[in-house]
Amino acid sequence: MKFKFILGIGLTVASLHLNAQVSPINAARNNKVNKKYLKHVREIINSYQKSVAYAKEHNQKPPDEYFLHDYIATMDPETGAVRNQNYVALEQAVAAGKYTPKQSLKMFGGVKDMNAKDGISNQWVERGPYSVGGRVRGIMFDPNDATGKKVWAGGVSGGLWYNNDITNANSEWTLVDAFWSNTTVSCITSDPNNPMIFYVGTGEVETGDFSGLGIWKTSDGGATWQQVFTLENGYNGNVKRGMYNIPTIKVLNNNGASIVLAGVAGTYFGDAQTFAGLYEAGLYKSTDGTNFTLMASLMATSTRGYDIQDIEIGADNAIWVATRRSYFSGSNSGGKIFKSTDNGTTFTNVYDVGNASSRVMVEVSETNPLKAYALMQGANTSSEPIRMAKTIDGGVTWSSTNVPLSGITLPNPIDTGQPDNDFTRGQAFYDLVIETDPTNDQIVYAGGVDSYKSIDGGLTWAQITKWSNNNLMAAAPISLVHADQHALVFNPKNTDQFVMGNDGGIFFAANKNSLASTSAIAMRNRRFNITQFYHGTLNPTATTANEQMILGAQDNGTQELSGSALSNAFYNSSVVYGGDGAYTAFDDQDKYLIASYVYNFHYLFNSQGMYALINNSTQQNSGQFINPLAVDRNLDIAYTNATGSGTSVILHRIKGLDTLPFSPTRSQLNIATVTSGELISDILVSPYSTTSSTLFVGLSSGKLFKVTNADTTPVTSLFALNFGGYISDVKLGASENEILVTVSNFNKTSVFYSTDGGVNFVSKEGNLPDIPVKAIFMNPEDNNEVILGTYYGVWGTSTFQSETPQWALYSDGLGKFKVNHFDYRPSDKTILAVTYGRGAFTTKIDRTLATSDGQHSLLSNVVYPNPTRGPIQLKFDTKGGNTADIEVFDAAGRLVFKKKNIKSNEEFSIESLSKGSYVLKASQNGTMIYSSVVIRK
């Protein structure tokens, strides 16, 4: 439920829109919102809000709202569909060399890659976090490792990895192949008849994630991979066809012949256009590991199978299959366990919890094929949120926790914040683990928020992990392990050991028989950098030698990376604020920083403590899940999005960020009235308006507003061009006249550029492939160089000013991962790339301009100090002459300072200029040799 507000501050709306010209492909849509796109957005949000109401009514956590907005941000506006298969085709084109850089960019010259092909230096440096991790569901001990030490694991985002010695606390993980960044790894298994064959299932159905790309197979122990399952094959009515979610795969050894069993489930984001994979749900079988067919022996109706959650193979080769809910209306898919004793020819329904929405996990004893346990959502999510059941006769009869004195009970959490009858805390749809000891099926492990162990077949339980030291947990002598358990896997070579996967990555138990200590289960996340960052900011007063950056992470708080770089180039990490991290900000004079939780829970940290930017509880719960925020560093004002839906574009305004003691002035700005479904997607504060706030506010509908005097009595203008989709980023070049805009939807023009303040925009799409574009940055020293953050790594061009720029993949070191945001520090020319699934990376702009550009080289520390209080020097190569002419321009492009015949390293002063940002240009004999933003503080 979102909230509307009565506003105390009005906004004068300009009656004349800014004129615009665009490339012919978009001219027909000039001034028009895509009504079909808005219809998709409204239906998605309406259905999402219904699901939230349902979740609250049934004591469940609502779906992951980030994926909701990510879907809106990337879907094809015309069809409402995502185009994940584009990544597969793009991977093939990249492998064939189609997008290989032809030359180096100065933006990547500050870090030299000695191994770069053809002398191209385009290296990003991984900065961390080094041992934080991220969400993991798929884990497997390598069957080819006789020592039992090598482990494979897949990040829900961030790729597929292996660790050669999980027993060693200092062992590091190795990334297998960066292409896995574009999909969600949900499960991994091997072929018992050929241990060199692995299968990886993709797509996280538990969160409604759409990033699944079918099944991937290796026949050489993980060296190479191929897609083997059908994906994205059109529509049935308005339901998108394809295998988007493969939560489970098992391989049955049928007398030396391998039968691959894959469970497929459907998912949705609310309206008919965003259902996906519903018709493909079911149990699939392959006898050659490549071609899969739906098993007619296990069908929910005559035409489609059940939605599958879990598959287990018994010691007698019996196949046990557990189900989950289907999004078909009236479906009875969930809450069931089926069993086959004839290799899947026939199945028998051996258990039904009576809740068609129930997610069920089943676990079969490795020593007794008649014994099995099951953990599931209960028959009623309010009175029985979860249920555990056990059979000792192959599923004929069951004992269960809903029957008193049945011989099986639920674990009782130490944490007083978790109900006695629900150790998943309303999240059984998300975190649910049940495993038996491979040598003793009386020993059972269960996981929800925390983990538990029973040594008497589920009659009694002991807690073995705690997610924090809150309340009564502080005194418990058990290990601190990240919350939300998703996997527990025993080492087949040493069954005293097991590995756990959760929202914090990988944890290792060296001795299952000795878990009652705070060190029994230890983190194993060294270099397992699959952290999902939403946003990040460099401290503008820091340096790479003494760094400070803060980044907001999914379920891993706001992380600070700081200090001197370690020998491996990572920075030490610490947590600024916990929970989900979101948008971040730094003051330009290091007086404060801002970390965020979800919605409008933003917190300012200064020398005196921590303070809420917004202190009204209703307003704190306004906005979006990961809520846009921007700070005017010149005036110390924060602006945040105040609405999540509705027909108003509203901003919170918080003045006085630099006050000590913190004493802000809070108000709201009504920017515009819009159609329902038009959401704020980006806020940019211009660094060039130094005595007032100028904002650029982009919407999910393609509208872009310019708001002047936002700090006093704002005036808003709507750019005449509608950009046709979700505005993901707005950046400025050398002044407010130079505007760069990106759109993140599939099947849309992604990059726009104006040199006249938005009067005219042109497309800069060039040869860019059809992938979501989330961020843009222009080299302040060369406006021909621009980089893009995409869902397939970083792309760059050195021909941005041409009519059709030529884009290439500049992602060495970073990989082909989702890049959400760029930040830039002018003082040492550091660029930060914020990824969703691979942590943080930096690079530096080269301080040497290529002579092939007809310009002269500049030495290190080109302009310094920067920021400056007035005195400034320029260091340059004197090959083109002993002096240079200096010009400084303000945000409006007006010449405000001029100095002729300045020598290299000669000091001059811009003290007469007001505080703010300016553009400094240096020229020799009429030829510009240098251009940079200079901050007068």
Image (cartoon, grey):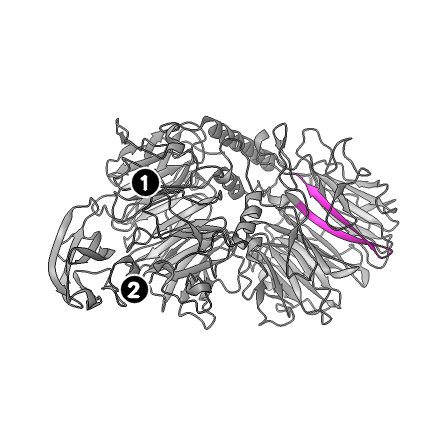
Residue 155: quadrant of the picture: bottom right
Residue tagged 2: 848
The residue sitting at 49% across, 44% down in the picture is: 771
Is residue 782 visible to us here?
yes
Mark 2 against mark 1, which lies toward the viewer? 2
Q: Position of residue 539 (x, y in %)?
A: 34, 59
Tell me the CA gap for discs 2 and 1.
33 Å
Q: Viewer-proximal residue, 219 or 455? A: 219
In the image, is 684 to the left or to the right of 912? Answer: right
Residue type, mark 1 in image: Phe
Q: Which type of secondary structure does the marked residue at label 2 adopt?
A: loop
Q: Viewer-proximal residue, 31 or 569? A: 31
Residue type, mark 2 in image: Thr
In the image, is 317 to the left or to the right of 96? Answer: right
The majority secondary structure of the magenta stretch comes to strand
Q: Position of residue 195 (x, y in %)?
A: 75, 62
Q: Which type of secondary structure does the marked residue at label 1 adopt?
A: strand
The crowd level at tag 1 (other Cα within 10 Å; few <14, some 14-19, many 20+) is many
Is residue 265 part of the magenta span, yes or no?
yes
Question: Residues in magenta?
Answer: 246-266
885, above or below 4, in the image: below
372, above or below 277, in the image: below
167, above or below 326, in the image: below
Q: Position of residue 55 (x, y in %)?
A: 60, 37
Is residue 405 visible to us here?
no
The residue sitting at 68% across, 41% down in the picture is: 265
Q: Which mark is residue 331?
A: none
Q: Which mark is residue 696?
A: 1
146, above or below 217, in the image: below
Of mark 2 and mark 1, the one earlier in the sequence is 1
Q: Viewer-proximal residue, 759 or 683? A: 759
Q: Viewer-proximal residue, 66 or 398? A: 66
